[in-house]
Image (cartoon, rainbow, N blue to C red):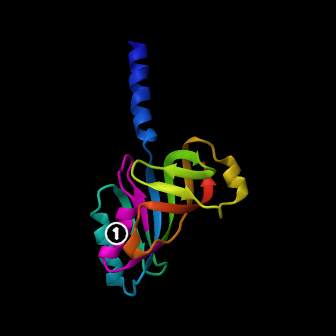
Amino acid sequence: MRNMFRIMMIGLFGIGTASGQITKVDQEVYGMDCAPCAYGLERGLKKMDGLQEVRVSLNDGKAYMGLAAENGLKLRSIQEEVKKNGFSAKKAEVTLIGNAKKEDGQWYIETANERFSVSQDTPTALLQKLTVGTATISGTVQDEEDDNLSGQWSIVLTKIE
């Protein structure tokens, strides 16, 4: 009976970490020039399933988002919501749990829904710490053109936990 419980617990915890997810996004937003604009964007973002906390700062030109545990949100969906509200989403600082892989000399971090290509601009010391398997990383996702949100991102790592 104890072994059955252990197997069930390993299965439950394995499901949450195997697929990966974004846990935090600080999204640069261009085009906000008034408080009602920022408020409207904040309301739009709060309607998205998976966001636990949302704060939009007109002064910083950013939307700060904490994502709920076991969310299925994509960075692309967040940036599309920014665009839908009349603004342009630029680079984003993200924290995510994903599966680190190396293919043909290139590192990738994959969540359940997106793929992040690790930029060669990542400091060498961080690249040397990266290992195959589940990783919690933070980094800056490079800007994508609003009309070409591919869901495949380039990320400069700033931290590996």
Residue 144 image offset from top left, x and y in percent: 46, 71
Tell whether 49 sits left or right of 69. Answer: left
Residue 85 image offset from top left, x and y in percent: 30, 76
Q: Does the magenta stretch include residue 62?
A: no
Q: Residue furthest left?
A: 47
Front residue of 57/72: it is 72
Q: Name the residue under label 1.
A: 80
Which residue occupies 35% across, 63% down? 77
Which residue occupies 33% across, 82% down? 37
Q: Give the range drawn in magenta.
A: 64-90
* Quadrant that contains the N terminus: top left
Note whether 143 is above or below 75 in the view shown: below
Q: Which amino acid does label 1 sit on?
A: Glu
Which residue occupies 59% across, 51% down? 107
Q: Does the magenta stretch include residue 73?
A: yes
Which residue occupies 42% across, 21% down? 7
Q: How many marks?
A: 1
Residue 139 image offset from top left, x and y in percent: 57, 60
